[in-house]
């Protein structure tokens, strides 16, 4: 499904990013990996970058080749990191990288953002989301203080804003055939899963208790890879839950189903 395509995958050294990079290659694509650490698996090209730093992101944009057919924005940090760092990597750096790369992408390219079930309530955060639209790297601390964003709330907000940004850009580059979508996993079975659940509180632990198991990177990668393929060309601005039914469970409970 990706034969002949070049896909940029951020966060490609571990977790969902590594699983996505492997699947892209299995489906015939060429992988350009971006991460702070070199991937253990073979990739077609590797660029080391820290997405929390504007100068590094700008240098990365300049160094990446023209003509990529897809961008998978998977790099991220957990809610156990400082709030400002979470926003810089998971939102500001992601958006800055994407905006810089769009002119270099091939016509018809696909952009896939890794959001989260944590972004479910994005519509309740619209004032802060609107305030973050043009937020710069150097303004993050003041923004967090202004909106009371601390601790795990930084992760929730970053994912809420990312879902909203995906919806907003449903047709932004339609004249070039470039589309943007998001994938929202629930809890993923990685070494930091206990940290995530501890950060998200009693509600998250209670919801996790009804699941048969946490997700795995290999559960999420096929959805990302599909949205990078031409088979998803008519899906635009969507946020696709890939969470074993958790999104449906939360919505059904809220509406009495």
Image (spheres, rainbow, N blue to C red):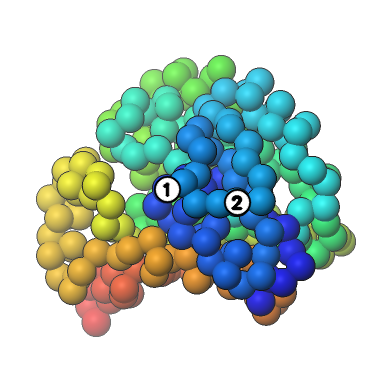
Q: Which residue is mark 1?
A: 14
Left or right of residue 250, residue 207 in this image: left
Q: Residues within 10 Å of mark 2 (few under 14, many from 20)?
A: some
Is any part of residue 178 visible from this angle?
yes
- Distance between the alpha carbons at the discs numbered 1 and 2: 13 Å
Q: Which of the two marks, 1 or 2, is nearer to us in this view?
A: 2
Q: Quadrant of residue 78?
A: top left
- Can the viewer see residue 168 in this picture? no
The quadrant in which the C terminus is found is bottom left
Q: Residue at x 35, y 52 (%)?
A: 118
Residue 150 in the figure: left or right of residue 29: left
Q: Is residue 66 above or below residue 63?
A: below
Q: Position of residue 183 (x, y in %)?
A: 49, 62
Q: Are marks 1 and 2 in contact (CB under 8 Å)?
A: no
Residue shown at 36% from the left, 44% from the top: 156
Residue drawn at the location 24% of the way across and 64% of the way down: 214
x and y, in percent, of residue 215 in the image = 30, 65
Which residue is identified by label 2? Answer: 43
Tag 1: Cα neighbours inside 10 Å, few (<14), some, or many (≥20)?
many
Q: Which mark is residue 212?
A: none
Between 40 and 186, the one lying in front of the other is 40
Tell me which label, 1 or 2, sits earlier in the chain.
Answer: 1
- Locate residue 229, reporting x and y percent: 67, 71
Task: Place residue 27 in its image quadrant.
Answer: bottom right
Q: From the top left corner, tell me how far across and down residue 158 is, in percent.
A: 45, 41
Q: Quadrant of the N terminus?
A: bottom right
Is the residue 21 above or below the residue 148 in the image? Answer: below
Q: Nearer the viewer, residue 38 or 181?
A: 38
């Amino acid at each position: 499904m990706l034969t002949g395509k070049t896909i940029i995958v951020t966060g490609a050294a571990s977790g969902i990013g590594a699983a996505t990079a492997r699947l892209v290659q299995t489906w015939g694509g060429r992988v350009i990996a971006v991460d702070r650490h070199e991937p253990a698996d073979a990739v077609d090209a590797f660029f080391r970058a820290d997405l929390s730093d504007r100068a590094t992101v700008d240098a990365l944009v300049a160094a990446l080749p023209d003509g990529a057919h897809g961008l998978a924005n998977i790099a991220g940090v957990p809610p156990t990191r400082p709030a400002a760092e979470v926003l810089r990597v998971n939102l500001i750096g992601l958006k800055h990288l994407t905006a810089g790369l769009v002119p270099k992408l091939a016509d018809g390219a696909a952009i896939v953002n890794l959001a989260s079930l944590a972004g479910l309530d994005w519509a309740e955060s619209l004032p802060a989301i609107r305030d973050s639209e043009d937020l710069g790297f150097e303004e993050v601390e003041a923004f967090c203080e202004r909106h009371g964003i601390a601790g795990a709330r930084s992760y929730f907000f970053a994912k809420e804003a990312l879902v909203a940004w995906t919806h907003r850009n449903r047709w932004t580059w339609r004249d070039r055939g470039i589309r943007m979508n998001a994938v929202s996993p629930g809890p993923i079975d990685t070494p930091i899963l206990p940290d995530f659940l501890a950060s998200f509180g009693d509600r998250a632990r209670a919801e996790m208790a009804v699941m048969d198991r946490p997700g795995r990177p290999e559960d999420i990668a096929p959805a990302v890879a599909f949205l990078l393929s031409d088979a998803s060309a008519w899906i635009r601005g969507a946020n696709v839950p890939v969470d074993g039914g958790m999104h449906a469970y939360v919505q059904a409970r809220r509406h009495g189903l």
